[in-house]
Image (tube, rainbow, N blue to C red):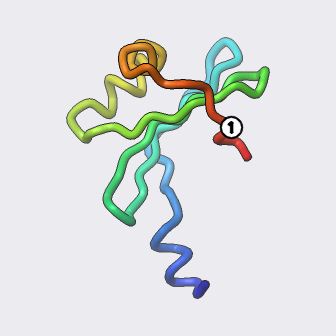
């Protein structure tokens, strides 16, 4: 993989917060122009949601509500 290709496919962190053992990150992937909210807790449990631009900040602020609504399962996104 070339350096330029790697740079283009890397996610870019747009916002991050940590509170009560929960890390929440909003990131953008230029490849496909996709937004993601990733949640990781101190126990190592995590999940990730693909989000639309118009809902990104709301999902970032309330990821568990969106995960429950969408039926998300815990993933190992830290690996």
In the image, is residue 67 above or below residue 2? above
In the image, farthest residue toward the left: 54
The x, y position of residue 4, in whole percent, is 51, 83
Left or right of 62 on screen, residue 4 = right
Q: Is residue 33 left or right of residue 24?
A: left
Question: Residue 14 versus residue 68: which sits nearer the camera?
Answer: 68
Number of labelled discs? 1
Can you say which quadrant of the picture contains the N terminus? bottom right
Residue 16 showing in the rendered view? no
- Which quadrant of the structure image shows residue 46? top right
Regarding mark 1 in the picture, which secondary structure is present there? loop
Q: Position of residue 17 (x, y in %)?
A: 55, 28
- What residue is rendered at 50% in x and 57% in y? 11
The answer to whether one can see residue 31 in this image is yes
36 in relation to 75, above or below: below
Work out whether residue 9 or residue 74 is closer to the camera in this orientation and state it.
Answer: 74
Residue 35: % across, % down: 37, 46
Residue under the image location 42 percent in, 27 percent down: 60
Q: Is residue 54 left or right of residue 50?
A: left
Seen as rendered, the residue at the extreme right is: 43
Expressed as whole percent of the image width and height from the top left, the position of residue 5 reads 50, 80
Pointer 1 local density, CA inside 10 Å: few below 14, some 14–19, many at least 20 = few
The residue that label 1 is drawn on is 76
User: What residue sits 43% from the left and 20% below the top?
Assistant: 71
């Amino acid at each position: 993989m070339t350096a330029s290709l790697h740079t283009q496919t890397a996610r870019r962190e747009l916002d991050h917060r940590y509170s009560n053992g929960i890390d929440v990150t909003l990131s953008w992937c230029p490849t496909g122009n996709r937004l993601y909210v990733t949640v990781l807790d101190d126990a190592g449990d995590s999940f990730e949601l693909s989000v639309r631009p118009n809902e990104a900040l709301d999902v970032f602020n309330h990821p568990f509500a969106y995960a429950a609504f969408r039926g998300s399962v815990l993933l190992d996104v830290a690996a």
